[in-house]
Image (cartoon, grey):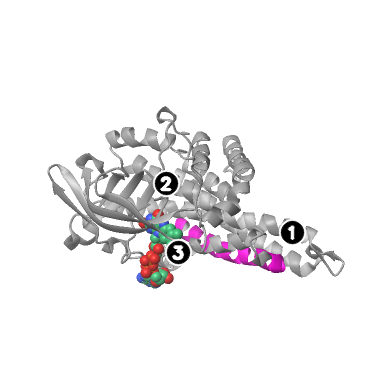
């Protein structure tokens, strides 16, 4: 008989609980300061590496966890329940960067970079530019070949983890006239000549997660640092982002659950009209609806991740789970703010931050309109 969707195998349950206990014990006390200072302390990142959360799918012989994509999704969900900024740091590392290397890296590339990514190297994924977001393949960053090297010139914008990362997957075109067929993925190390991390954005939410510009000013990249094939970067981008979206779905589910946890606790404590506000049926029904939505979003995310691990088609399910879970996150965090009343609006209480953090789910890794476009294409043929 097939297992129910939310049934976790022993190792999955243990892993999820370990991640959540770590987040609750070691991340929670830092959340407000990280949000205010808009940074993640390196010591916390080192802990993420020590505990194996930064190389979940990398095989054990290369220092990784040898686990599944589903485990990565559980990690992102559990971390995001406490802090969606830490959730996305781990998400980009696992579901985009490592995922792309595992799938598209040559043997030499995998040997060179996967042990580092499992040990201490943060990765980033650089597709977007100022003029090309949803229309990502209209990028203007150029790659030209000379003296057995590639030279990259241009700018990337909005790059998550850029401040902490030492390895960047950078997409550039080798031939703008070829459209998407010119797009190629390169592995760029922070120390390569001509590469700099530029302006860091000052954001509404997920403030501790760094989002920066990358400047490629004649950046020299060795020929064997092409990831996949020249001109096939569009495939790498499309396929990794399809998987990455499930991770963002997990971030939004974790975030929603975190807001719900706070709200449930608060309504039992806060008294008005002589009794806890959680005893008013109107409040109970609002919470019941929110819990139902979070459960539905989680089922969608888990199903998409399980399909991916089972090598079944999951394009539609990934788009749907990101679309839905990011909308749920906005609704549930808004409800949490409402239920906290005035206290929900101030920074001494945790829910206003989750409300701010929720908004990004409808924007990155394909806006909600782009997810709708993908789903519409699937259903209309
Ligand atoms: C905090 C943050 C982190 C990010 N991290 C990364 C990262 O690590 N790597 C990376 O490469 N990028 C990253 N991004 C970029 C992100 O993926 C883009 O912002 C996103 O894809 C949208 O692109 P855009 O901002 O250019 O908006 P636009 O594409 O200009 O979209 C603007 C509006 O127009 C709508 N729209 C556009 N085209 C259509 C259409 N055809 N039909 C209907 N509506 C349409 C959109 O839905 C949106 O509402 C990040 C962004 C943010 C804010």
Indicate whether 160 appears above or below 344: above
Please report whichever mark, 2 or 3, sits nearer to the chain's N-terminal start. 2
* Among numbered discs 1 and 2, the one appearing first in the sequence: 2
Quarter of the rendering containing residue 93 = top left
Find the residue positioned furthest to the top. 61
Up/down of 280 relative to 50, above or below:
below
Which quadrant of the rendered structure holds the C terminus?
bottom left
Q: Which residue is mark 2?
A: 164
Determine the quadrant in which ligand 1 lies.
bottom left
Residue highlighted by disc 3? 363
Give me the residue at 29% from left, 55% from top.
Answer: 215
Which residue occupies 38% across, 33% down? 115
Measured Cα–Cα span from mark 2 to mark 3 = 22 Å
Cβ atoms under marks 2 and 3 closer than 8 Å: no
> Mark 1 or mark 2: which is in front?
2
Using the numbered discs, state the Cα–Cα distance from disc 1 to disc 2 in whole angstroms: 36 Å
Residue 168 is marked as none
Query: How many other residues sit within 10 Å of disc 2, few (<14), some (14-19) or many (≥20)?
Result: many
- Left or right, 120 with respect to 261, comes to left
Q: Say how many tags the image has.
A: 3
> Which residues make up the magenta segment?
318-343
Dot 1: within a 10 Å radius of its alpha carbon, few (fewer than 14), some, or many (20 or more) residues?
A: some
Distance in Å between CA atoms under marks 1 and 3: 30 Å
For label 3, being within 8 Å of ligand 1 is answered yes
Answer whether residue 365 is visible to the viewer in this image. no
> 177 or 167: which is nearer to us?
167
Which labelled disc corresponds to residue 266? 1
The verdict on label 1 being within 8 Å of ligand 1 is: no
**Residue occupying image coordinates x 66% and y 63%:** 336
Query: In the drawing, does residue 129 fall left or right of residue 251?
Result: left
Element at badge 3? loop
């Amino acid at each position: 008989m097939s297992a129910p969707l939310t049934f976790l195998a022993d190792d999955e349950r243990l892993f999820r609980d370990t991640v959540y206990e770590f987040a609750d014990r070691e991340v929670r006390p830092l959340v407000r300061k990280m949000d205010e200072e808009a940074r993640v302390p390196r010591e916390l990142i080192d802990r993420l590496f020590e505990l194996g959360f930064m190389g979940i799918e990398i095989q054990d012989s290369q220092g990784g966890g040898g686990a599944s994509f589903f485990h990565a999704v559980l990690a992102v969900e559990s971390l995001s329940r406490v802090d969606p900024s830490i959730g996305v740091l781990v998400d980009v590392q696992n579901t985009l960067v490592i995922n792309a290397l595992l799938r598209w890296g040559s043997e030499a590339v995998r040997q060179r970079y996967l042990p580092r990514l499992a040990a201490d190297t943060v990765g980033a994924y650089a597709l977007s530019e100022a003029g090309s977001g949803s229309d990502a393949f209209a990028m203007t960053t150029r790659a030209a070949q000379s003296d057995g090297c590639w030279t990259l010139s241009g700018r990337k914008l909005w790059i998550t983890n850029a401040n902490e990362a030492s390895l960047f997957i950078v997409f550039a075109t080798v031939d703008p006239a070829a459209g998407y067929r010119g797009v190629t993925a390169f592995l760029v190390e922070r120390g390569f000549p001509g590469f700099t991390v530029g302006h860091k954005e000052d954001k509404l939410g997920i403030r501790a997660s760094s989002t920066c510009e990358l400047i490629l000013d004649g950046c020299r990249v060795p020929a064997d640092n092409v990831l996949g094939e020249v001109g096939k970067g569009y495939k790498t981008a499309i396929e990794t982002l399809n998987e990455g979206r499930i991770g963002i779905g997990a971030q939004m589910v974790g975030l929603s659950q975190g807001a719900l946890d706070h709200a449930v606790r608060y309504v039992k404590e806060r008294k008005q009209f002589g009794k806890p506000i959680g005893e008013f049926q109107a409040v109970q029904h609002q919470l019941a609806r929110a819990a139902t939505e979070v459960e539905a979003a989680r089922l969608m995310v888990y199903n998409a991740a399980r399909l991916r691990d089972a090598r079944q088609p999951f394009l539609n399910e990934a788009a749907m789970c990101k679309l839905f879970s990011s909308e749920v996150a906005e609704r549930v965090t808004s409800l949490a703010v409402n239920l906290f009343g005035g206290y929900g609006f101030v920074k001494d209480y945790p829910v206003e931050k989750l409300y701010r953090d929720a908004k990004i789910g409808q924007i990155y890794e394909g806006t909600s309109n782009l997810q709708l476009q993908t789903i519409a294409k699937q259903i209309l043929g």
